Image: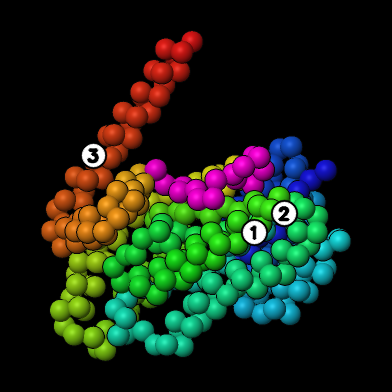
Amino acid sequence: SSFHVLVTGCSSGIGLAVASRLAKDELRRFKVVATMRDLEKRGPLEKVAGDSINKTLEIKQLDACCEASIRECVNSLPDRRVDVLVNNAGVGMIGPLECQNMSDMKELFDTNFFGLVRLVKEVLPDMKRRQSGHVVVMSSVMGIQGLLFNDVYSASKFAVEGFCESLAVQAMKFNIKTTLVEPGPVVSEFERKVYEDATKMDLSGTDEETARIFREIYLPYSKKVFASLGQTSEEVAEVNNSSSDHPRTPPLRHQTNRLYMPMTTLKHADPTGRLPLDTFYKMIFKHDGVMNYIGLYRRQDVTCRLQRRLQIYDNS
């Protein structure tokens, strides 16, 4: 029998990649309900999903900001059955805080945080009753560690992490698994749009120095990081697929980008928080270092892989 998977935010990016990948599973283990707020944006998903449409993949409308919409979607499923919830719908926001208005911030939280809460609230009671289920949540490395000019976005991901970490303990008692998927930089339509908006942003609300840092240091720096560390939505979906395959105990946190991992380990390495702060400061403001840093970890990454290969041969 197949797992019934509900995926949100499937009109582009990671949601689209996850939904189509699960639907095309060779063993046909998944029945995918791919949802999006605006069904007029279903074209790209239909194109990628191809033959699997109406066989292993069904497209439905769901607005994560509306309880009635979520309930209607879940009610339309046979027995309201959701074995795996993949919460992916999200919005981005970057820029100096003074230039962002409160209503945009609230909207961001309404999707990124409360959207997750509404969905979980709808499917959790059924999962508890069935004593099985898996909640997979698209978080971000920015849910572990804040990043310059990503204050509000990062705050929403911190909220997501705290919510899931707390809920996971209760969920375990009912045999429900929780996984936070934490991509680093992802090269997708989502990111492209966020950065495109950023270049056109009205910076008159902030001081000249902050505006300069944002335009001349942060944006070009981000471009470099995306070019050298970025993953595609498909790569993230591949990792996500393996966590939906129901290993007996999937990890609570899953960072998809091994090249980014050294950055997040800094936080655990120094509980006072000085180390990550100083490192990020140096990388951004004295920033000849960033490319050497990336090169170094690329090399280490290759070396580690070689070592692992050799160990495999040693053992045999």
SS under mark 1 = helix
Q: Main secondary structure of the magenta part?
A: loop
Q: Residue at x 24, y 73 (%)?
A: 214
Q: Amino acid at mark 3?
A: Leu
Residue under label 3? 296
Question: Where 146 sits versus 54, above or below?
Answer: below
Question: Where 48 sits versus 305, above or below?
Answer: below
Q: Residue at x 33, y 35 (%)?
A: 301
Residue under label 1? 170
Assess whether residue 251 is covered by the magenta stretch. Answer: yes
- Extent of the magenta region: 243-258
Residue under label 2? 174
Q: Position of residue 188 (x, y in %)?
A: 46, 59
User: Mark 3 vs mark 1: which is more N-terminal?
Assistant: 1
SS under mark 3 = helix
Q: Amino acid at mark 1?
A: Gln
Q: Left of 136 or right of it: where is 203?
A: left
In this rendering, the count of numbered labels is 3
Q: Position of residue 92 (x, y in %)?
A: 44, 71
State which quarter of the image contains the N terminus: top right
- Tags 1 and 2 touching, CB below 8 Å: yes
